[in-house]
Image (cartoon, rainbow, N blue to C red):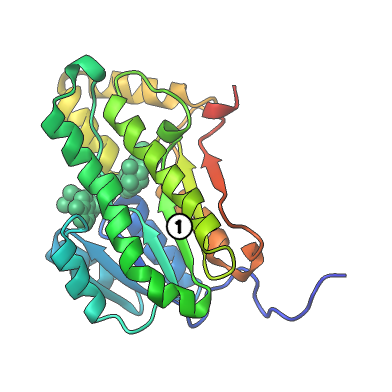
Amino acid sequence: MISLEMSNPFGLDGKLALITGGASGIGEATARVFSEAGARVLIVDLDAERARAAAETIPGGEARGCDVTDEEQVRKLFESIPALDILVNCAGIGMVGGIEETELREFQRLFRVNVDGTFLMTRAAIPLLRRVRGSVVNIGSVAGLVGIKRRFGYCATKGAVIAMTRQLAVEYPTQIRANCIAPGTVDTPFVDGYLEKYHREEKDKVRQELNERQPLGRLGKPEEIARLALYICSPAADFMSGSVITIDGGWTAG
Ligand code: NDP
């Protein structure tokens, strides 16, 4: 029998969600979708001005500048947050290169943002999330599940994000829910930046190749990832923890 207890099993009424990387791309879309679902959202991003600009367009949106790799900044940020229901770790950067092209400094920078940042934010949020059986959503990538040519460092960081998610689910089985979304390529400034940096002369051609890499024949939309994050954080997904969910146009199905 279907329970009638939940008024809206897919809503986030009254919840407070912190979204890192919330000033751009998937994070910004997530802030918007969560707000539409009834949550108050706190956008956290490197650039405080951009975070504020994004928050101003979202009802109930607030913003804070914070470098998620900086332990002191993260500590200060959480001093001003008395309660939290949802943490979405979305801040992340990319890097192109096989192992022999990868400089240690670049590799470490990638780990600082994608792995240390997720670690520091989650560690700071756990005491608040445990009080309310809150939810952590890590934005991983298919790169953490399958090898992608010339993405040595990036694949390594996203593998770590998946491993951290599963460990949290095991460590706190009843106190929090921790899940990871593994998107394929999504049309955001992250991809624009990649095309500009590595393929300035042939952007259209490479964009087409990115479309074709996914059997569905197109890039994902940030809103599509955001709606999956909404489902994961909603009461409807109460039984979901430790899951790694691909959303990749069929990329990893083959
Ligand atoms: P965007 O570049 O559009 O957004 C990422 C945001 O994170 C930016 O606003 C960026 O700020 C911010 N950020 C970077 N470093 C830090 C930091 N140290 N502290 C706080 N904020 C920071 O990327 P996407 O929305 O595309 O990507 C979001 C996440 O999704 C990333 O983790 C990415 O790896 C992952 N992902 C993306 C895919 C894609 O194809 N787009 C596919 C699979 C996963 P700034 O711009 O100032 O650097």
State the residue in front, 40 or 119: 119
* Depicted 116 relative to depicted 249: above or below: below
* Depicted 176 relative to depicted 201: above or below: below
Q: Residue at x 45, y 57 (%)?
A: 137
State the residue in front, 118 or 201: 118
Q: Residue at x 44, y 69 (%)?
A: 86
Image coordinates for residue 211, horizontal then vertical, percent: 42, 26
The disc labelled 1 sits on which kind of residue? Val
Q: Quadrant of residue 158?
A: top left
Q: Quadrant of residue 56?
A: bottom left
Work out whether residue 66 can be spotted.
no
Image coordinates for residue 196, horizontal then vertical, percent: 17, 30
Q: Quadrant of residue 89?
A: bottom left
* Residue for badge 1: 137
**Figure quadrant of the N terminus:** bottom right
Work out whether residue 122 can be spotted.
yes
State the residue in front, 210 or 240: 240
**Tag 1 secondary structure:** strand
Is 45 displayed left or right of 151 in the figure? left
Q: Residue furthest front?
A: 171
